[in-house]
Image (cartoon, helix red, strand yellow):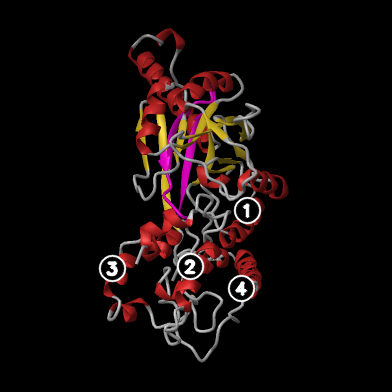
């Protein structure tokens, strides 16, 4: 157990570091989850053509 | 995934009745796809503004164009731009046509068209459309170099689909901040771009392109195949009807057209005059306009059309192309020697050089070109 009064002792820094790492990891998981859900962008598929010139099938 | 489907122009076929018939079918099928926007190419006016508007209304084809106006009224002939929303992203779709493209229609009743400078039009229009849209999508029918100029000179165009690029296979590139996309020609290929749009400001962040060849490796849609088969039956009936308007019932099946080179042996000087004349190139000029299957045109650009043993597009009569000697002088096997063939030849000129097709015809002037 890490006592509060030792917060800034060696164990305290270790605890702080550990807490910091855990917080970052948890944020990362959240980010990955939000990317999987579409995240900070939206998707559209653009289908495009040009110069069909009345063709419905190639000759021959 | 939401799909935005567009075309950058020249969807319609060449200026003849057969291809107009086919274009009508193509319009029906494309309408069933639920396309979102179609840019205007010069070929889309081949059958006249009336036909285009009929296809727009009947098959819900979403044509748009910002720089082609009716020269008389000054009005744009199509909606100036379209706003299409997909996945909460608003696309402002603008189409422009190169003024160098000459618009020629089959109809004599169409208004003349004025094609305005596309850069000037885009400079004014893009900022205006930006107020309503997140992304500007340009359906350009300008050709490669002019598309480059357009996106460099007019800022704010997010995507440009390049039309009138003929067989250019440069499928995608980026110029400044514009994604340039090309999907080649004649329906042989189709382009797909997966767009990644910033959630916060609606700007295009990235895109992933693939261009698919619509060859035998792609599975056919049974539904569309059936539509095509039905169309081919209608086409055959259409062509039979056309041919029946021009039956091969003149002349005699006992006589033969001997072909121009047969005349050369005895009439070399006359043959040389013919060889240098427009008569010798009559079929090529027709083919260059894509009208070499049109009976109305073939009757005057071939030899012996509507005559027994005269021109047909099927062997062995398909070599009777051009206005050969016998087109005016009659069956070579007959080879009249009593002088009547000269009179017959002179009278035959105005059968083809009529007011509709040859309004400036004057016998004396035209004779000088083929005098023999």
Q: Which residue is mark 2?
A: B346
Please state the chain letter of the residue tagged with numbered disc 2 in the rendered image: B
Please report, as a chain letter, where disc 1 is located.
B
Q: CA distance from mark 3 to mark 4?
A: 32 Å
Q: Which residue is mark 4?
A: B246
Instruction: Please name which of the two marks, 2 or 4, marks the residue nearer to the observer.
Output: 2
Say if residue A29 shows up in the picture.
no
Write the start and end of the magenta stretch as one range: B181-208
Q: Is residue B60 magenta?
A: no
First reached walking from the N terminus: tag 2 or tag 4:
4
Give residue B307's position: percent from left, percent from top: 54, 79
Answer few, some or many: residues within 10 Å of disc 1's Cα (few below 14, many 20 plus, some between 14 and 19). Answer: many
Q: Residue at x 40, y 19 (%)?
A: A15
- B112, above or below B26, in the image: above
Estimate the x, y position of residue B48 in percent, counting from the top left: 61, 46
Q: Nearer the viewer, mark 3 or mark 4?
A: 3
Identify the disc placed on residue B27.
1
Circle 3 crowding by C-alpha within 10 Å: few under 14, some 14–19, many from 20: few
Residue sitting at x 64%, y 28%: B75
Q: Nearer the viewer, residue A5 or B178?
A: B178
Say yes or no: labels 2 and 4 on the same chain. yes
| Image location of residue B15, percent across then percent down | 54, 54
Q: Secondary structure at mark 3?
A: helix
Q: Nearer the viewer, mark 2 or mark 3?
A: 2
Say whether mark 4 and mark 1 are on the same chain. yes
In contact (CB < 8 Å): disc 2 and disc 3: no
Q: Secondary structure at mark 4?
A: loop
Question: Which quadrant, please, contains the N terminus of chain B?
Answer: top right
Say which residue label 3 marks: B272
Dots 2, 4 in contact, CB < 8 A: no
């Amino acid at each position: 157990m890490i006592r509060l009064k030792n917060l800034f002792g060696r164990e305290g820094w270790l605890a702080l570091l550990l807490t910091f790492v855990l917080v970052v990891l948890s944020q990362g998981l959240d980010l990955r989850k939000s990317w999987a859900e579409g995240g900070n962008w939206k998707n559209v598929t653009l289908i495009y053509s040009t110069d069909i010139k009345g063709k419905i099938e190639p000759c021959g | 995934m939401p799909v935005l489907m567009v075309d950058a122009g020249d969807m319609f076929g060449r200026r003849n009745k057969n291809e107009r018939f086919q274009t009508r079918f193509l319009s029906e099928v494309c309408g069933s796809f639920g396309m979102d926007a179609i840019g205007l190419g010069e070929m889309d006016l081949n059958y006249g503004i009336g036909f285009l508007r009929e296809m727009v209304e009947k098959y819900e084809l979403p044509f748009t164009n910002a720089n082609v106006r009716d020269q008389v009224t000054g009005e744009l002939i199509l909606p100036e731009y379209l706003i299409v929303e997909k996945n909460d992203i608003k696309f402002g779709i603008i189409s422009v046509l190169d003024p160098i493209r000459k618009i020629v229609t089959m109809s004599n009743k169409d208004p003349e068209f004025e094609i305005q400078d596309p850069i000037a039009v885009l400079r004014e229009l893009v900022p205006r459309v930006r107020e309503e849209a997140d992304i500007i999508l340009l359906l350009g029918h300008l050709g490669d170099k002019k598309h480059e100029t357009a996106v460099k000179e007019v800022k704010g165009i997010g995507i440009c689909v390049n039309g009138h690029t003929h067989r250019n296979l440069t499928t995608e590139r980026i110029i400044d901040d514009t994604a340039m996309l090309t999907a080649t020609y004649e329906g042989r290929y189709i382009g797909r771009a997966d767009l990644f749009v910033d959630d916060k400001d609606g700007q295009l962040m990235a895109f992933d392109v693939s261009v698919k060849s619509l060859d035998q490796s792609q599975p056919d849609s049974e539904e569309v195949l059936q539509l095509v088969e039905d169309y081919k039956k209608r086409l055959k009936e259409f062509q039979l009807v056309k041919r029946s308007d021009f039956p091969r019932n003149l002349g005699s099946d006992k006589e033969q057209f001997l072909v121009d080179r047969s005349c050369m042996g005895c009439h070399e000087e006359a043959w040389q005059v013919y060889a240098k004349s427009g008569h010798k190139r009559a079929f090529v000029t027709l083919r260059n306009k894509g009208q070499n299957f049109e009976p109305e045109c073939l009757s005057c650009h071939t030899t012996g059309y509507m005559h027994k043993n005269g021109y047909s597009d099927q062997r062995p009569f398909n070599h009777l192309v051009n206005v050969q000697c016998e087109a005016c002088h009659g069956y070579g096997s007959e080879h009249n020697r009593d002088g009547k063939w000269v009179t017959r030849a002179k009278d035959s000129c105005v059968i083809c050089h009529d007011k509709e097709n040859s309004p400036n015809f004057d016998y004396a002037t035209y004779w000088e070109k083929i005098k023999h």
